[in-house]
Amino acid sequence: MFQKIKRRLIPILIIAVAIALFVYMKSTKPVQKPVDIKEKVWLVQTLTAKFEHLAPVQKLYGTVESYSLVSASSPVNGVVSKVFVKAGQTVKKGEKLVFIDEADLTIPLKQAEAEAANAKAQLTLQKLTNTANQKRLEHETKVLKLKQVAVMRSKQLMQKNLASQSALDAANEALVRQKYTVVGAKLAVQENRLKLIQAQASLEKAQASLQQAQLNLQRGQLVAPYDARIAKVNVSEGSRVNTGAVMVSFYALDSLELRAKLPVAQLPAVEQALRNDETLNAFYEFSGNKTKLSLLRLAGEATTSGVDAFFKLPESLLSARPGALLDINLEGVSEGKVLAVPYSAIYGNNHLFLVKDSRLVSHAVKVLGEVQRNNQLWALVKPDFKEGTKINITHLPNATSGLKIAEDGE
């Protein structure tokens, strides 16, 4: 009996000791202090808003063009005798460019002179013939009147039995023949008038051909009509050219313009300035030097990406060639109470983060364009908050309203 109780009591004691040991160890274990989670603070740089009176600047990319590019063609079929210029060469007004062989120009001129002389002689001959036909018509008309008087006299004599019927018949026959003669004379006068018109037209045509031959003689000895630069030379000495073949291309030095695409967003302000006769200028910077280009006009057609604007190239940029690419900064109309901020402060297209109570607050603004600051382009915005407000200018990828920040230097 005692052995049975002993066997049952030992496992119970072991379990009790284990529970007591577990309770003791749990009650005596070190207590871990709760973790104090602190909000992360982002270190940023800020800019204190200071409103100014500034003009927005828009960067544009343009191509140099010439509005007076001339392609001089050969006026006749012939051989090039002289080429005085090369591509890229600058020439003065009156300098020789390209000459066609003189024989190819003078032979057509002599032929035209001969045709004009022949047409003039034909016209003179027709005038003489017309004068003769007029006199003949006048003469035959007088004769017709005499024949009519003779018939009347014959009739009167017959009534008095002083003339025979045969005499009257002869007078009538002579009258009829004279009428036909007068009709023929009138037809000759009318026909000669038409021939006179034809001769006059032939003379005018011959004179026009003569003027064309004289003009071809001038055009075949091509000289510079103004100060220009040679764009391309298409012929060489000894080349045979056909009528209309381009020999040389050139453009006036003062005809150079810069064509740049103006964004659609900037179009209303530029058009308003042009309507108000306000001068808008762009600036081209190279090697630390700024060159001013005046806006001349806007293109007559637009595309979905904007409208082409044309700028006058100053003398300092006349060395540029058509096709050259230039980037310029277009200065818009000056506005008051605007703010310049670095592009690192812009989020999206039109958002800034203001600093209030050490936290960021998103704020929408209107971006007007750009301005130059410290040789860098800054965004020019139209703010609707108070001057002196601090703006975050450190670009944070996780920036959002309520983000805790600390200003650099605090």
Image (cartoon, rainbow, N blue to C red):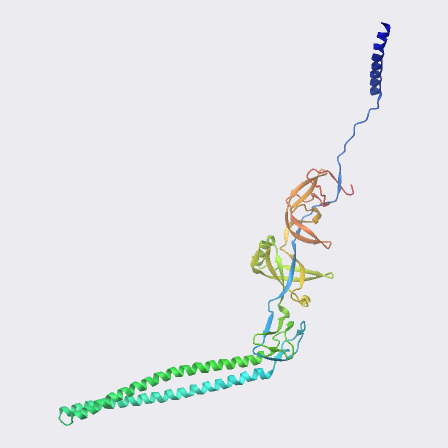
Q: Position of residue 72 (x, y in %)?
A: 59, 74
Q: Please identify the residue farthest to the bottom as the structure is shown.
A: 162
Question: Looking at the rendering, which quadrant does residue 320 occupy?
Answer: bottom right
Q: Position of residue 73 (x, y in %)?
A: 58, 74
Could you say which is closer to the camera, residue 35 or residue 292?
A: 35
Q: Quadrant of the N terminus?
A: top right
Question: Looking at the rendering, which quadrant does residue 214 occupy?
Answer: bottom right
Q: Quadrant of the C terminus?
A: top right
Q: Residue at x 85, y 12 (%)?
A: 10
Say above or below: 266 vs 404: below
Say above or below: 298 vs 9: below
Could you say which is closer to the camera, residue 350 or residue 234?
A: 234
Q: Residue at x 65, y 58 (%)?
A: 61
Q: Residue at x 34, y 85 (%)?
A: 189
Q: Position of residue 338 (x, y in %)?
A: 65, 49
Question: Looking at the rendering, which quadrant does residue 89 occupy?
Answer: bottom right
